[in-house]
Amino acid sequence: MKKNLKKTNFIMCGASMLALSLSACSLKSNLDEMHDSTKDMAKTTVEMANTTTDMAKTTGGMAKTTTDMAGTTKGMAKTTEHMDETTTDMAVTTKDMSETTKGMAKTTEGLATDTKEVLATSKELAVDTKEVLNTSKGLAVDSRDMKKNTINMYTDGRQGGGVTIRHDSLAAMKAASTVESKLVQAGLYMMAMEFQLAKEEVSPQRLQHLCQEGLQEFFLTVMDFADKGMQPNPASSADKDMNLNAFVVALDQVNPNAQITADIMKRPQISMLSLIEDALRDRKTPFAALTPDEGARSEVLKNEKLAIYLLQSRANFMAAMTLSKISNINHDGFLGIPGFFTKIGMLLFKWNAILDGVNADQALEYTEFLQKSNSTRSFLTSIGEDSKIDSKLAKIYRHMQIKAPAAEPAQAAELTSAQKLTKERNAALRELVSEIDRFRAK
């Protein structure tokens, strides 16, 4: 720049000299202007230097920015490559979606057709359903009629079957010659009572009527066998007394089917014994004042003396059954004229109960007989009636010698089968002796 300045000055001097020849007056003015211009150029030169420095800094920043842009451009290039790949995949996917959409369109068209067919079928089904409903209503009416007819047929069958069984059992009992055979037939007779054959469809009111009808029939039947003076005859071998005694033993007989029905209906089991005892338990209400729903109690109270006589006979004969099992009293006829001398000895002197060969089950059976006798005696006492235990029977029991086996001591070792049987037998015999003592104490 200095070289240019010098050249400029030289040219200016030449120009000045030429101008001097033209006008000397203007030279000074020109020189002053040149001086001022030189100052301005110096100032501008400094400013240009500063600007150049700033441009150098800016150029460095631009260089760095350019480098960063180059890196960014490379990243963008890679991203662009991935975008190309993604775009290609999207194109494939779009093509698949297009094909799928076409398939869905076809399926939708098929579904529309199927829906129309289903709608048509539904309308047909609605018509068929209405026809079925109408038919069902008709069947419901027919079913009610069938149920009614079935109940009527069952009622007729129950009545007819029960009457036939009772008739046949009564005839067989009269024809039987042994107490055991008579007991079996008496039990069948009781279980064939219509109130024992009734099922769930029988209302409580109807069941009460059936009980009343059963009591009517039973009282009329046993009247043929009853003692005229209504005195128990446990030792009699007369056929009519044996028949009556068989009936009183069977008073508590319950038909197994009646037990099932009672459980289903959640009501107490009913037997001839329970009907008689329930009626006699509260005798304050005269039978004439009873309502129709209390027909069974009314029937018992109409036959009160007969009912009490039956219970007295039961208390006597059940005790006599136990006695016959643990003695030889029935070897020549049960308490009848045959074997009289044997009975005289038992009436006048002490005698030993025969327990040899009695197993646990037998001992429990003999105990049950006596338990029922004692229970009936207790009931009679509770209503203010005498059991009228036969005097001979009572004396024989008082003269009986029987000792309960001692309780076995506890054993740590496990018992053998034989020891278990002995233990069970001894326990059963102790129960038997306990009931005998209870009978003798009354």
Image (tube, grey):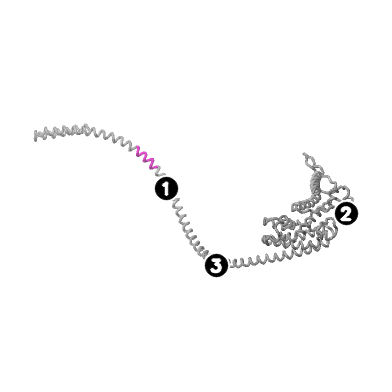
Q: Are marks 3 and 1 in contact (CB under 8 Å)?
A: no
- Mark 3 residue element: helix
Residue type beneath disc 1: Met
- Mark 1 residue element: helix
Checking the image for residue 83, the label placed there is 1
Of 278 and 158, the residue lying toward us: 278
**What whole-number distance in Å separates the C-alpha atoms at marks 2 and 1?**
121 Å
Q: Label 3: how many residues lie within 10 Å, few (<14), some (14-19) or many (20+)?
A: few
Q: Residue at x 84, y 52 (%)?
A: 391
Checking the image for residue 331, the label placed there is 2
Q: Nearer the viewer, mark 2 or mark 1?
A: 2
Which numbered disc, 2 or 1, marks the residue that appears first in the sequence?
Answer: 1
Instruction: Give x and y (percent) for residue 167.
Output: 78, 64
Q: Is residue 429 above or below residue 115?
A: above
Range covered by the magenta-colored residues: 64-74
Q: Nearer the viewer, mark 3 or mark 1?
A: 3
Most common SS among magenta residues: helix
Checking the image for residue 127, the label placed there is 3
Residue 259 is at least partly visible in this image = no
Q: Is residue 111 above or below residue 8?
A: below
Instruction: Give x and y (percent) for residue 343.
Output: 88, 52
**What whole-number distance in Å separates the C-alpha atoms at marks 3 and 1?**
63 Å
Instruction: Give x and y (percent) for residue 118.
Output: 52, 64
